[in-house]
Image: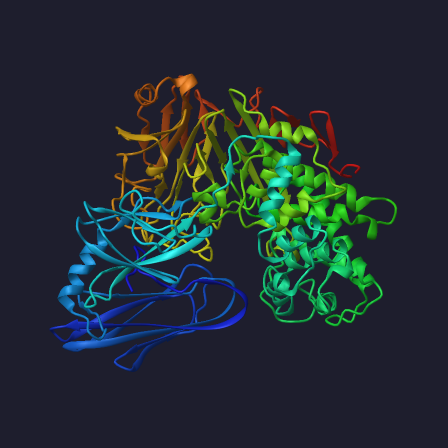
Amino acid sequence: MHTAADGLVDWSAFCFTPEYRLALAACVLEADQAERRVLRTATTGPMLLFVNGEVVDESDTVTYMEPAEREVRIWLPSGTTTVVVASWQVAFREVRQVVRLRVGGLPVRVVVPAEGACEYTSAVAERLLDAVGTTRWGSTDGTVPLTGPAGAALRVEWPGHTSRIRLDGGRATLRLDGAGPQTGEGAAGAAPEPPAGETVLRIFADDPRAPVFREFPVAVLPRDHRDSPTGDPAEWRAGFLRHAARADGVGGELVRALTDPGHTVREPALARALWMIGNRADCADFEAVGLYHLWRRAPAERWEPGLRERVKAALLGFKYWIDQPGLDAMCYFTENHQLVWHTAELLWGTELAGETFGNTGWTGAEHAAHARGMALSWMRRKLAQGFSEFDSNAYLAIDLLALVSLVEFSESFEDGEGEVVRLAAGVADRVLFSLAANSWRGIHGCAHGRSYVSALRSSRFEETAPIMRVCFGTGALNDAVLPAAVVATAGRYRMPDVIRQAAHDLPERWWGRQSYRGEYRYAHDLLSRPYGSDLTVYKTPDAMLSCAGDYRPGLPGLQEHVWGATVGPQAQVFVTHAPNASVSPSARPGAWAGNRILPRARQHEDTVLALYRIPDDDVMGYTHAWFPLGEFDEWVRHGVWTAARKGNGYVALATEGGARPGAAGPDAWQELRPVGPGTAWVCTVGRRAVHGEFGDFVRALAEPDFGPGRVALRTRAGTELSLDWSGPFTVDGRPADLAADGTIATPPQLDNPYAHLAAGASVLRIGPHEIDLTRGRDV
């Protein structure tokens, strides 16, 4: 096992059900001179440290994401010493299970304890593998470009496949369909294209005497993406339904049942959902809502015999909220899960009103009453206050799953006043308008309250992408089928046409602001404090730039994507302060999603200034930029700037001393590392129609003024911008947060070409469409 820059052996995983996880990491150290040494361990769970079979240290400390560190002084004898670290956890949901071991003092040799291993051959292999890289994380054709020492023979393993390749001229192309290396036209067979998704390559020197390897995460990207709409909404919907009908799971089965009158609902398509509900696995609430759609919309005579009874029994025995009996790993504390739980309980409680639910002993009617009040409270708060998981490219889709479901089936539980349906329709409109206003060419490219690595590297993996495809005719078709299927097949909910117009509108300059202000509730959120975000969005026909201004700067981060530039589905540029080297979705934050310490970032028009704090004891000790150079048509380094072009759109990024791309590893020519301290960055976007040819754009870039805890820039338009940690963000010397009379301005709730909503206003007008922020809107 070769550890990355964080030195961690990483078993992190997402545990859908509670698990007991025991992990062992072992190594053999060799020292010529016997002496006392200090062993430093770091783990996220309880641990035992063994040296030559004897316990020398133990801990019962449990941490969430960052490992707890310990040290112990030991006697290291001459010769070899076996060291074993055992660590264990009772695991729920995102599990950060890691171990690090460091030896204080002079270096010691690590022996490779593998049968048949040769230390000299393995040493050569280590150096070869350190020079191997992949220049593109994802591709739509299932190929992976590899670079490294010319002539090196490599063995590459990934699930179900092994391939041997040779780096002729220092390059080769691996095919994930298993057809072998692609070295020229017609060189590989006509194997089927691999399905979209992520996998991990293990790369070895092709020599049995060298068991050492490197791991490279790579992806096959969903192929079907549109950056502009063609056809009409009926065609977009039909195209999505054809795609979804090929999908596994409840979402695919729902589409098949609704589009094929002869289709029979069968157990294999529901097996995963029934397992999740029966085992109370995390995200089972999503499946419960999906099964309700099938239950209501697929006639009983078109179900496999006995299957409806199994579904009914599973839902009667289910747990619908945290205070109901039973131990589980299901999440109730995030914004999206809360509404889905209330929706599932309200729908199934109403449907089975006279039945007894075995887990609680309540009737269905009692469950429905319990859920209705909580659903109403959630929707009132979000309609008026906005979202804590602001503009999440994962969880807005889940919010819509619940909201549209409430609209569709409201006749079952409404009391004549229509309160639930009005609120649900109003919040759904706000979600879709946010998606329209804060996306660009089918890419949900704005700042996000929560996001994941894969969706930040390629918008083709965004869970909001299929919804945009259905509603706007842009975006990608991927595996996030269920929410989009509910939206696409809705009978009562209809998105206002003006929202579609906003999504399609790409004026010469779009400037948008969105301000959310709300309060967490401890019993629901495990937090008791205000939340807020101030989102800015700049768009042109050729580029997008977005920032969550002054979002909790200097405080610990989680999954927030604070700012980024977008000029294509994979041509996205952003900077993070990484706490580790992990790309696992269970590392929150990780190498590329979130920040260990949130930056101070502000945007003015087409430019973002961002400041970062790196503590003296920071494990990684740097910030870094995701700038996948292979996704651009051309790029250049110009002084402290790295600039690139995609089509007619330009993006440029600067930091003190400039930044250099790495030439090896899984992020080769995709990651930029700062030459200087990396505590201040500037990003700007442009376009050919305004800024001339790419060379003209680059030559017009002024060098920022970097200093300790500050940065200033004179933009191409001549505007003077300045940002530091302790003072105001200024534009031409004036604090940007002041009103015309010099008082502190209150930001509008919304302000863009289609809507202006002042702070405290109670009616949102999107063109001709109105939403009452206390009542919602009629359906």
Q: Can residue 358 be seen in this view?
A: yes
Q: Is residue 747 visible?
A: no
Q: Quick one: 196 or 611, which is closer to the camera?
A: 196
Task: Quarter of the image for the C terminus: give it.
Answer: top right
Q: Which colour scheme appears in the figure?
A: rainbow
Residue 473 vertical placement versus 454 (above, below)? above
Spot the residue most to the bottom: 54
Q: Position of 100 compared to 735: left or right? A: left
Q: Quick one: 777 or 670, which is closer to the camera?
A: 670
Q: Residue at x 62, y 51 (%)?
A: 482
Q: Residue at x 57, y 53 (%)?
A: 247
Q: Which residue is drawn at 15% across and 60% down?
A: 124
Image position, residue 642 (x, y; %):
31, 32
Residue 652 vertical placement versus 170 (above, below)? above
Residue 585 vertical placement versus 678 (above, below)? below
Q: Residue at x 33, y 61 (%)?
A: 8
Number of numbered tags placed on the structure image: 0
Image position, residue 737 (x, y; %):
53, 28
Q: Position of 648 compared to 480: left or right? A: left
Q: Quick one: 779 or 765, which is closer to the camera?
A: 779
Image position, residue 427 (x, y; %):
69, 41
